[in-house]
Amino acid sequence: MIRVLLAEDHETVREGLRLLVNAQPDMTVIAEVGDGRAAIDTAATLKPDVVVLDLSMPMMGGLSAARALKRADTGTAIVALTRHQDDAYVRELLQAGASGYVLKQSASEELVRAIRVAAGGGRYLDPALPPADASHDPRSRPTTPRATEREVEVLRLIAAGHSNKDIATALDISVKTVEVHKANAMRKLGLRGRTDVVRYAVINGWLNEG
Protein backbone atom coordinates (compact mmCIF):
# COMPACT_ATOMS: atom_id res chain seq x y z
CA MET A 1 0.00 0.00 0.00
CA ILE A 2 1.39 3.41 -1.02
CA ARG A 3 1.10 5.81 1.93
CA VAL A 4 0.35 9.35 0.72
CA LEU A 5 0.57 12.74 2.43
CA LEU A 6 -1.48 15.53 0.80
CA ALA A 7 -0.15 19.11 1.07
CA GLU A 8 -2.69 21.51 -0.44
CA ASP A 9 -4.02 24.73 1.08
CA HIS A 10 -7.47 24.67 -0.57
CA GLU A 11 -9.75 22.39 1.47
CA THR A 12 -12.10 21.54 -1.41
CA VAL A 13 -9.20 20.57 -3.66
CA ARG A 14 -7.64 18.55 -0.85
CA GLU A 15 -10.92 16.69 -0.31
CA GLY A 16 -11.05 15.79 -3.99
CA LEU A 17 -7.47 14.55 -3.90
CA ARG A 18 -8.21 12.43 -0.82
CA LEU A 19 -11.20 10.80 -2.52
CA LEU A 20 -9.14 10.14 -5.65
CA VAL A 21 -6.19 8.58 -3.82
CA ASN A 22 -8.30 6.51 -1.41
CA ALA A 23 -10.30 5.14 -4.35
CA GLN A 24 -7.16 3.40 -5.62
CA PRO A 25 -6.70 -0.19 -4.41
CA ASP A 26 -2.99 0.33 -3.77
CA MET A 27 -3.01 3.77 -2.09
CA THR A 28 -4.15 5.41 1.12
CA VAL A 29 -4.00 8.98 2.42
CA ILE A 30 -2.35 8.95 5.85
CA ALA A 31 -2.47 12.72 6.50
CA GLU A 32 -3.46 16.09 5.03
CA VAL A 33 -1.87 19.50 5.62
CA GLY A 34 -2.50 23.01 4.35
CA ASP A 35 0.95 24.62 4.22
CA GLY A 36 4.58 23.86 3.45
CA ARG A 37 5.91 23.89 6.99
CA ALA A 38 3.25 21.45 8.14
CA ALA A 39 4.17 19.20 5.21
CA ILE A 40 7.78 19.04 6.40
CA ASP A 41 6.86 18.36 10.03
CA THR A 42 4.27 15.73 9.15
CA ALA A 43 6.54 13.96 6.68
CA ALA A 44 9.29 13.79 9.30
CA THR A 45 6.89 12.17 11.77
CA LEU A 46 4.89 9.81 9.53
CA LYS A 47 7.44 9.15 6.77
CA PRO A 48 4.93 8.71 3.92
CA ASP A 49 5.95 7.00 0.70
CA VAL A 50 4.83 9.99 -1.39
CA VAL A 51 4.01 13.63 -0.68
CA VAL A 52 1.66 15.29 -3.16
CA LEU A 53 2.83 18.89 -2.89
CA ASP A 54 0.97 21.97 -4.11
CA LEU A 55 3.46 24.68 -5.13
CA SER A 56 1.47 27.75 -4.07
CA MET A 57 0.90 27.45 -0.33
CA PRO A 58 1.09 29.83 2.64
CA MET A 59 3.85 29.81 5.26
CA MET A 60 6.32 28.16 2.89
CA GLY A 61 6.17 27.71 -0.88
CA GLY A 62 6.14 24.26 -2.41
CA LEU A 63 9.62 24.59 -3.89
CA SER A 64 11.14 25.53 -0.54
CA ALA A 65 9.22 22.69 1.10
CA ALA A 66 10.47 20.22 -1.51
CA ARG A 67 14.07 21.23 -0.84
CA ALA A 68 13.57 20.88 2.91
CA LEU A 69 11.94 17.46 2.50
CA LYS A 70 14.89 16.22 0.48
CA ARG A 71 17.38 17.61 3.00
CA ALA A 72 15.49 15.73 5.74
CA ASP A 73 16.20 12.52 3.82
CA THR A 74 13.12 10.63 5.01
CA GLY A 75 12.96 8.55 1.84
CA THR A 76 9.70 10.24 0.86
CA ALA A 77 9.12 10.82 -2.86
CA ILE A 78 7.70 14.18 -3.94
CA VAL A 79 5.04 14.74 -6.60
CA ALA A 80 4.48 18.42 -7.40
CA LEU A 81 0.92 19.41 -8.27
CA THR A 82 0.57 22.83 -9.91
CA ARG A 83 -1.02 24.95 -12.61
CA HIS A 84 2.37 26.24 -13.77
CA GLN A 85 3.74 24.84 -17.03
CA ASP A 86 6.92 26.96 -17.20
CA ASP A 87 10.19 25.15 -17.86
CA ALA A 88 11.81 27.11 -15.04
CA TYR A 89 9.45 25.59 -12.48
CA VAL A 90 9.87 22.08 -13.86
CA ARG A 91 13.64 22.36 -13.70
CA GLU A 92 13.69 23.82 -10.20
CA LEU A 93 11.41 21.12 -8.82
CA LEU A 94 13.44 18.33 -10.41
CA GLN A 95 16.65 19.84 -9.09
CA ALA A 96 15.02 20.12 -5.66
CA GLY A 97 14.44 16.37 -5.74
CA ALA A 98 10.86 16.00 -6.96
CA SER A 99 10.03 12.69 -8.66
CA GLY A 100 6.85 13.88 -10.35
CA TYR A 101 5.40 17.04 -11.87
CA VAL A 102 1.66 17.03 -12.61
CA LEU A 103 -0.61 19.84 -13.83
CA LYS A 104 -3.82 20.52 -11.93
CA GLN A 105 -5.64 20.99 -15.22
CA SER A 106 -4.78 17.45 -16.38
CA ALA A 107 -6.94 14.37 -15.94
CA SER A 108 -6.88 12.84 -12.46
CA GLU A 109 -5.29 9.68 -13.89
CA GLU A 110 -2.05 11.62 -14.40
CA LEU A 111 -1.67 12.22 -10.67
CA VAL A 112 -2.40 8.57 -9.91
CA ARG A 113 0.26 7.48 -12.40
CA ALA A 114 2.76 9.96 -11.00
CA ILE A 115 2.22 8.69 -7.44
CA ARG A 116 2.79 5.08 -8.52
CA VAL A 117 5.90 5.93 -10.53
CA ALA A 118 7.36 8.07 -7.74
CA ALA A 119 6.66 5.39 -5.12
CA GLY A 120 8.54 2.93 -7.31
CA GLY A 121 11.59 5.17 -7.49
CA GLY A 122 10.94 6.58 -10.96
CA ARG A 123 10.30 10.05 -12.40
CA TYR A 124 7.04 11.17 -14.01
CA LEU A 125 6.42 14.37 -15.99
CA ASP A 126 2.89 15.26 -17.04
CA PRO A 127 2.64 14.58 -20.80
CA ALA A 128 0.61 17.80 -21.15
CA LEU A 129 3.70 19.87 -20.34
CA PRO A 130 4.74 21.83 -23.44
CA PRO A 131 7.97 20.73 -25.19
CA ALA A 132 11.00 22.51 -23.78
CA ASP A 133 12.61 25.17 -25.98
CA ALA A 134 15.45 23.39 -27.78
CA SER A 135 17.66 26.47 -27.41
CA HIS A 136 17.02 26.66 -23.69
CA ASP A 137 16.07 23.28 -22.31
CA PRO A 138 16.41 23.37 -18.52
CA ARG A 139 15.06 19.82 -18.15
CA SER A 140 17.89 18.29 -20.13
CA ARG A 141 20.57 20.53 -18.64
CA PRO A 142 20.53 19.97 -14.88
CA THR A 143 24.06 21.36 -14.67
CA THR A 144 22.92 24.88 -15.61
CA PRO A 145 24.75 27.25 -13.20
CA ARG A 146 22.58 28.28 -10.29
CA ALA A 147 22.05 31.95 -9.52
CA THR A 148 24.38 33.40 -6.88
CA GLU A 149 23.09 34.62 -3.52
CA ARG A 150 23.45 38.25 -4.62
CA GLU A 151 21.65 37.59 -7.91
CA VAL A 152 18.77 35.93 -6.02
CA GLU A 153 18.70 38.81 -3.52
CA VAL A 154 18.29 41.30 -6.38
CA LEU A 155 15.56 39.18 -7.95
CA ARG A 156 13.66 38.95 -4.66
CA LEU A 157 13.70 42.74 -4.29
CA ILE A 158 12.54 43.19 -7.87
CA ALA A 159 9.66 40.77 -7.28
CA ALA A 160 8.71 42.76 -4.17
CA GLY A 161 8.32 45.86 -6.34
CA HIS A 162 11.54 47.76 -5.63
CA SER A 163 13.15 49.84 -8.39
CA ASN A 164 16.71 49.29 -9.61
CA LYS A 165 17.70 52.57 -7.94
CA ASP A 166 16.18 51.53 -4.60
CA ILE A 167 17.91 48.16 -4.79
CA ALA A 168 21.23 49.79 -5.61
CA THR A 169 20.91 52.04 -2.56
CA ALA A 170 19.83 49.20 -0.25
CA LEU A 171 22.69 46.90 -1.33
CA ASP A 172 25.27 49.69 -1.72
CA ILE A 173 26.01 48.83 -5.34
CA SER A 174 25.57 50.71 -8.62
CA VAL A 175 22.39 50.64 -10.70
CA LYS A 176 24.42 49.06 -13.50
CA THR A 177 25.48 46.23 -11.18
CA VAL A 178 21.84 45.68 -10.20
CA GLU A 179 20.96 45.36 -13.90
CA VAL A 180 23.78 42.86 -14.45
CA HIS A 181 22.71 40.73 -11.47
CA LYS A 182 19.11 40.82 -12.66
CA ALA A 183 20.04 39.78 -16.20
CA ASN A 184 22.30 36.95 -14.98
CA ALA A 185 19.67 35.60 -12.57
CA MET A 186 16.93 35.65 -15.19
CA ARG A 187 19.15 33.90 -17.73
CA LYS A 188 20.18 31.17 -15.28
CA LEU A 189 16.63 30.59 -14.05
CA GLY A 190 15.03 30.69 -17.48
CA LEU A 191 12.85 33.72 -16.70
CA ARG A 192 11.82 35.97 -19.58
CA GLY A 193 10.14 38.98 -18.00
CA ARG A 194 8.78 40.62 -14.84
CA THR A 195 5.70 38.36 -14.84
CA ASP A 196 7.99 35.30 -14.78
CA VAL A 197 10.00 36.86 -11.94
CA VAL A 198 6.89 37.45 -9.82
CA ARG A 199 5.52 33.95 -10.47
CA TYR A 200 8.90 32.45 -9.61
CA ALA A 201 8.90 34.47 -6.38
CA VAL A 202 5.45 33.13 -5.48
CA ILE A 203 6.53 29.52 -6.13
CA ASN A 204 9.57 30.01 -3.89
CA GLY A 205 7.48 31.59 -1.14
CA TRP A 206 9.52 34.81 -1.27
CA LEU A 207 6.48 37.06 -1.08
CA ASN A 208 5.21 35.28 2.05
CA GLU A 209 8.39 35.94 4.00
CA GLY A 210 9.26 38.89 6.19
Image: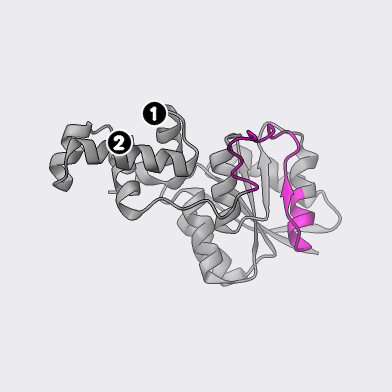
What residue span does the magenta drawing correspond to? 114-140
Residue 52 seen from this side: yes
Residue 109 as seen in the image, left or right of residue 162: right
Q: Pinpoint residue 106: horizontal percent, then vertical percent.
A: 72, 33
Which residue is rendered at x = 47% and y = 54% of the image?
A: 64
- Amino acid type, residue under disc 1 in the picture: Arg
| Image quadrant in which the N terminus is located | bottom right
Kind of residue at disc 2: Ile
Please indicate whether residue 19 sits to the left or right of residue 94 in the image. right
Q: Secondary structure at mark 2?
A: helix
Q: Is residue 50 above or below residue 57?
A: below
Q: Which residue is mark 2?
A: 158
Q: Which mark is residue 164?
A: none
Q: Are marks 2 and 1 in contact (CB under 8 Å)?
A: yes
Which residue is drawn at the image coordinates 13% and 47% (left, top)? 172
Q: Which residue is mark 1?
A: 194
Residue 120 horizontal side relative to residue 145, left or right: right
Q: Which residue is at a point 80% across and 41% down the rendered structure image?
A: 109
- Kindly identify the residue that appears in the image at 45 percent across and 35 percent down: 199
Q: Is residue 139 magenta?
A: yes
